[in-house]
Image (cartoon, grey):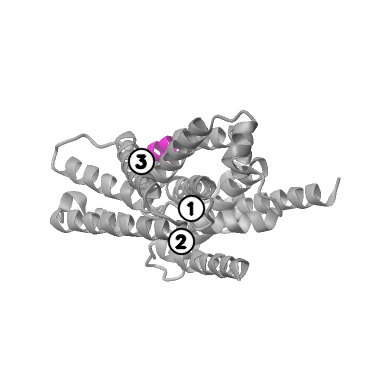
Amino acid sequence: MNAMKKRIALSYVLLAGLALLFLCLGISVGTASVSPGDLVRILTGRGGDDTAAMILFRIRLPRTLAALLLGGALALAGYLLQTFFHNPIAGPFVLGISSGARLMVAAALIAAARGAIRLNSGVLAAAAFIGALLAMSVVLFLSGRIPGMSLLIVGGVMIGYICTALTDILVHFADDADIVNLRDWTVGSFSGMKGESLAVCAWIVLPAAAAVFLLSKPIGAYQLGESYARDMGVNIRAVRGAMILLSSLLAGCVAAFAGPVSFVGIAVPFLVKRLLGTAKPVCMVPACFLGGGVFCILADILARTVVSPGELGISTVTAVLGAPVVLVIMLGRRGDRA
């Protein structure tokens, strides 16, 4: 085994170990702690405290699994967008795609509260996908008319601000008892995840992640330039369309069930690339998914323990953890141009 393969293998072992560790911590820590002994007995079916078992299976396990799935989805969405635009700070949150999904989900929640539609997890996911796709369409429209990637990023940020402002207006005029949780949802959280919602997340995220992995070879050719990819027989239009749809679907799913989650889509692919020492999609895609899950489980643990018994918005914690990484990326790119 050469040095590169050994490094990649060790990186996967590290990510898998961290995922397992944080999964155990995620279901153990909180306002009511579950002791390691009780945790082992409950998970192995050998008894344990009934209250602890209820907390574990009904509240913490769905929440922690949701953080794993949706964190992986957000990291993959960021990786696809960075590949599509050939820019390491292109992500669902920065480009306004998450904000577009959030706007449509807020509209769906309000419509359901007024009796206009019947709300379920599938409707939320569909609304978020439509919002993400619409925002992505505006970004693509701008990309053909704005010279320079830096200006495109600014345009994406402006789209995000517009969508956020419209969402805030909807929330302001929809302040009634039927949607009391809407304000909490707009700050981002993995809390309140139930079995049905978790199942919908899994049915969306896992096939989408598998599709991204199957696209590893054409994405790798696309990374080397469109001319090279065409020479290799890659259908550029199909690959670009797949990346748009998959990134919108993944980012929309996160917005539907967790609200806005910032910086994960930028920070995780960068950190994973540094860890692996390679940008090959066949290595990056699974590692990004694991890395995103680890990042979001850690953020969720911090969100509900730092100010316990209160709780921070998940986006607040991911911003604290991820924003410094974005600054490092930007300083690195400035150094490359110097």
Dot placed on the residue nearer the N-terminal end, 3 or 1: 1
Q: Which mark is residue 32?
A: 2
* Kind of residue at disc 3: Leu
Report helix, strand or loop for mark 3.
helix
| Gap in angstroms between the C-alphas marked 3 and 2 | 40 Å
Report helix, strand or loop for mark 1.
helix
Residue 38 in sight in this render: no
* Front position in the image: 68 or 286: 286
Question: Is 103 located above or below residue 213 in the figure?
Answer: below
How busy is the neighbourhood of tag 1: few (under 14 within 10 Å), some, or many (20 plus)?
some
Dot placed on the residue nearer the N-terminal end, 1 or 2: 2
Q: Is residue 196 magenta?
A: yes
Q: Position of residue 274 (x, y in %)?
A: 66, 58
How busy is the neighbourhood of tag 3: few (under 14 within 10 Å), some, or many (20 plus)?
many
Secondary structure mainly formed by the magenta segment? helix
Contact (Cβ within 8 Å) of mark 1 with mark 2: yes
Dot placed on the residue nearer the N-terminal end, 3 or 2: 2
**Residue tagged by mark 1?**
52
* Kind of residue at disc 1: Ala
**Residue tagged by mark 3?**
133
Q: Which residues are magenta?
A: 195-200
Looking at the image, which residue is at 63% across and 38% down? 228
Contact (Cβ within 8 Å) of mark 3 with mark 2: no
